[in-house]
Amino acid sequence: MASPPMRAFLFQLWHRSVAPLKTHTRGFGLPRRRLECRFFSTGGPGQTDHDRARAFVLERGYTPAIADGIMAALKSPGAGIPQGRLYATVQEMAGRWEVGEDAGLHSLAKSVEQELHLQEGKRLVRFHVQPPEGEPFECEGFEGMSLKGRRAILLSMHGSEDIAEYGSGEGASLLKEYIECACSGVMACSTCHVYLDASSFKALGPADEAEEDMIELAFEPAETSRLGCQLRLSSQLEGMTVTIPGGANNMFDHIPFE
Ligand code: FES
């Protein structure tokens, strides 16, 4: 198995090959890289307005199920979108996506995502988050969600998603500010490191070798350390307490890439 620094290096190589890196400052002031999926085509002869709109949504990194949900929502009579304007509408809703600005597409995708979870009968799991300073806050997410970071890599395969991006409410927004995710969830940065309460740590089961390797490199690891990008919510984690460390090590900072 590749070492964490090697995984980080390989990921950067792959990352650069599929999409440009965009860096934002958030949370602890660490860079946040957003990954855009570019495995789909938005054009092509013979494509209908619906096909082009759906392909555009897929290209923004959403799953086929979410893309279909968005199409269904926009095509409903209540949406009031004239025939032949779907593609133009999703383009407008995507806003200036190249620089990380959205004009409504992401919000609609989140609503569709929530609806899909409800249709699948997934349970909402509620938990508490203790930031390094200040008051704890409540958070919730559907079973199977990570805290942050798995969406970018796995979305196109089976729709995995995270609470920070796809959760609802103030808790999700706060979590997004407090947990960094520099490697988009491929266990190559350790910026998503969190501590769990002892019983939730036990309920989650052991981390695999790759996660253990990365935790060793995290900021002040402890016995109940886990990576937020690998943690998947389950009913056993109802009521858990997630504590955010007072700092974060970003392994991407230690890669002599250039
Ligand atoms: S997001 Fe990089 S290790 Fe979890």
Image (cartoon, rainbow, N blue to C red):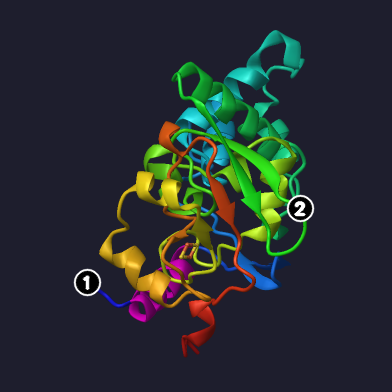
Q: Is residue 228 left or right of residue 132?
A: left
Q: Position of residue 12 (x, y in %)?
A: 45, 73
Which residue is drawn at the image coordinates 67% and 41% (left, top)?
Answer: 138
In this view, the residue in front, 213 or 3, is 213
Relative to 17, does residue 178 appear above or below in the rendering? above
Coordinates of residue 67 in the picture (x, y in percent): 53, 31
Q: Tag 1: Cα neighbours inside 10 Å, few (<14), some, or many (≥20)? A: few
Q: Choose between 173 and 23: the one closer to the eye.
A: 173
| Residue 139 at x, y percent in the picture | 64, 40
Q: Secondary structure at mark 1?
A: loop
- Amino acid carrying label 2: it is Glu
Q: Residue furthest left?
A: 1
Q: Nearer the viewer, mark 1 or mark 2?
A: 2
The number of numbered discs placed on residues in the rendered structure image is: 2
Query: Which residue is drawn at the image coordinates 53% and 46% (left, top)?
Result: 61
Q: Nearer the viewer, residue 48 or 218?
A: 218
